[in-house]
Amino acid sequence: MNNKHRKTLQALFATPIQSGINWADIEALFMILGAERYEGNGSRVRFLLNDVKATFHRPHPHKETDKGAVVSVRNFLKAGGIEP
């Protein structure tokens, strides 16, 4: 895991919850952690990480996440055994 991935992980677990985290950085973090990605319909994308499944919608038209998405990503990572 490089420094950019560490910063993304720290931003996801920061208090108070941050918005505006680039979705591409989150996907890159998932992949470096060993997640499998499955493309769904439209903006839907599914991930499997340590036997935990999650479905997310890629943000559009902007590339940054909102606070609700950050909470969902945080919960997915925690369920998969990942914390900073």
Image: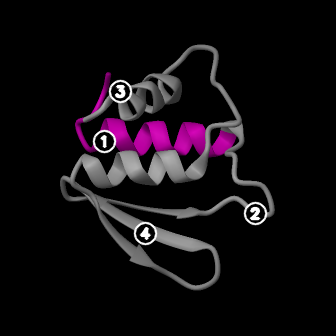
Which residue has dot 4 on it? 46
Secondary structure of residue under mark 3: helix
Mark 1 Cα-neighbour bin, 10 Å: few <14, some 14–19, many ≥20:
some
Q: CA distance from mark 2 to mark 4?
A: 16 Å
Secondary structure of residue under mark 1: helix
In the shown orientation, is residue 66 left or right of residue 31?
A: right
Q: Quadrant of residue 61?
A: bottom right
Q: Amino acid at mark 2?
A: His
Disc 4 versus disc 1: nearer the observer = 4
Q: CA distance from mark 2 to mark 1?
A: 26 Å
Mark 3 Cα-neighbour bin, 10 Å: few <14, some 14–19, many ≥20:
few
**In the image, is residue 75 part of the stretch drawn in magenta?**
yes
Which residue has dot 3 on it? 3
Q: Nearer the viewer, residue 1 or 41?
A: 1
Q: Say whether marks 4 and 1 touch (CB < 8 Å).
A: no
Q: Position of residue 49 (x, y in %)?
A: 26, 55
**2 or 4: tag closer to the N-terminus:** 4
Q: Position of residue 44 (x, y in %)?
A: 57, 73
Which residue has dot 2 on it? 60
Q: Which residues are magenta?
A: 68-84
